[in-house]
Image: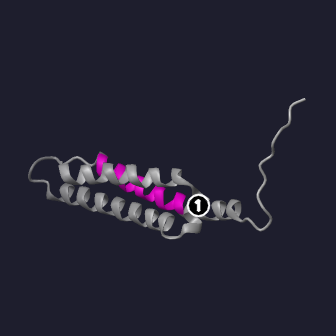
Amino acid sequence: MSDHLAITSAPGDDSGCLRRIMAVPLTILYALAAFCCCTALITRPSGSWDQDAYGAIALMSFLALALSALGLLVTVASPTVRRAMGPWWLAPPLVISVVAAMRWALGG
């Protein structure tokens, strides 16, 4: 017979509850940042004279960066949240930030 080791949390360990509670606002922040980033990516200027499109690209890129930074701040600021959420939660805002910064830098 094989012994199955069950991983159980210590009494009073609330990391599972904290993970579920923090997942909701982080998911909302990441979804909003991804929406802004996608909007910046799909916006195409009609020509070099289309300043409204260039402004929309800059605004959406900035909002994506700001929302990603807020998500990173929420995840990294508290050691308790950082331990409970794990390193995977740092990947989405970093990827979104890189894409948004590249789109903002390249402009049109």
What residue is shown with label 1?
83
- Relative to 53, residue 67 above or below: below
Q: Residue furthest right?
A: 1
Secondary structure of the residue carrying numbered label 1: helix
Residue at 38% over, 49% down: 95
Q: Is residue 97 visible?
A: yes
Amino acid carrying mark 1 in the image: Arg
Residue at 23% over, 46% down: 44
Magenta span includes 27: yes
Q: Position of residue 66 (x, y in %)?
A: 36, 65
- Residue 53 sits in which quadrant? bottom left
Q: Which residues are magenta?
A: 26-41
Q: Main secondary structure of the magenta part?
A: helix
Q: Nearer the viewer, residue 59 or 27?
A: 27
Q: Position of residue 37 (x, y in %)?
A: 35, 52
Q: Is residue 107 visible?
A: no
Q: Nearer the viewer, residue 74 or 79?
A: 79
Residue at 81% over, 46% down: 6
**In screen coordinates, is 104 left or right of 65?**
left
- Residue 57 sits in which quadrant? bottom left
Q: Position of residue 97 (x, y in %)?
A: 35, 54
Residue at 14% over, 54% down: 50
Image quarter in which the N terminus is found: top right
Q: Position of residue 89 (x, y in %)?
A: 51, 54
Magenta span includes 44: no
**In screen coordinates, is 105 left or right of 2?**
left
**In screen coordinates, is 33 left or right of 44?**
right
